[in-house]
Amino acid sequence: MEQRALGEVEQPGGAAEVEPPAGGWAPRTDGRLHVAIIMDGNGRWAVQRGRPRPAGHRAGARAVRRVVEAAPTFGITDLTLYAFSSDNWARPAVEVSALLRLLAEYLRRETPKLAAEGVRLGVIGRRDRLPLPLRHAIGQAEAVTSAGARLRLRVAIDYSARDALVGAANRLAAKGYATRAGLARALAEELDAGEPVPDVDLLIRTAGEQRLSDFLLWECAYAELYFTSRLWPDFGALDLAAALADFLARERRFGRVSPAEAHAESGSNDGLRALAAAADRRGSRVAQPRTREVAV
């Protein structure tokens, strides 16, 4: 699939133009841009329309397709979507069953398209509690799309960041020590991710909620957070573009001082040093007594 300019991305109901920021998007120094999305609001979308909640999940699946198609055109290399949390098992059984069936259906239907478009799909989270048809669909999708290099798509199913961290810590316990890199590898093993998940650059949450909900807690240590009131089924390429534009306008410091502040501080220090030197010179002159000859 050929990469398109931001203004060329088709939107539901017709094309719309958006000007990319000057200089383009701002990927990390390793050339990767990781966006994670908490896809919230499917149920509310359905209720507002007098429809059953599973209808909202089906509409949300169409939003997933729009975002996955748009992501590579915006320079996104890694996209992680929060589809089903471990806490979601507490929802009504009818809704849970419908959602898990929908996930299996989505994977079977979309896998050929993902492979054709160079998207490598992986699922992170527990698999032992998932229905057998969904586990088979996951394995098939991962195998068929394994050569994809245009976009790394991760879907979090039966996922809990806290549980993953506990599992990774248990894997490292026998070694007696842990490093950040070691914990990242242990997390990947715990999540069946194959390789460590790169740090998240931008986390987007839809539907007006402003919390992480146990999602990628380790990987979001320095993520920029973007919240929108848009319900997930209504989310599209233009919304993704708006989030990226907001992200690009931010200054990411990672605990450091910004270049502008560093320059200002340096100038301030130069002034202080000049004042200190002048004071020293003045003190030296005062400390030296004058001598004169006295006639006897």
Image (tube, grey):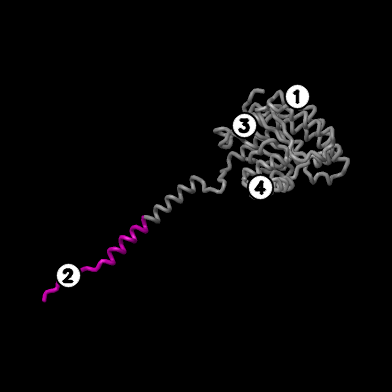
> In what quadrant of the picture does the C terminus appear?
bottom left
The mark closer to the camera, 4 or 1, is 4
Residue 203 figure quarter: top right
Q: Nearer the viewer, mark 1 or mark 3?
A: 1
Along the polypeptide, which appears first: circle 3 or circle 2?
3
Residue 94 picture location, percent across and down: 88, 40
Residue 166 is situated, as x and y percent measured from the top left of the image, at 72, 48
Question: What kind of element bears circle 1?
Answer: helix
Determine the residue located farthest toward the right in the rendered image. Answer: 94
Q: Residue beneath label 1, please?
A: 112
140, 284: nearer the viewer: 140
> For the view shown, which residue lies furthest in the bottom direction?
296
Structural distance between the alpha carbons of marks 2 and 4:
80 Å
| Tag 4: amino acid | Lys
Stretch of the chain drawn in magenta:
274-296
- For residue 175, say whether it is visible: yes
Q: CA distance from mark 3 to mark 2?
A: 81 Å
Numbered marks: total: 4
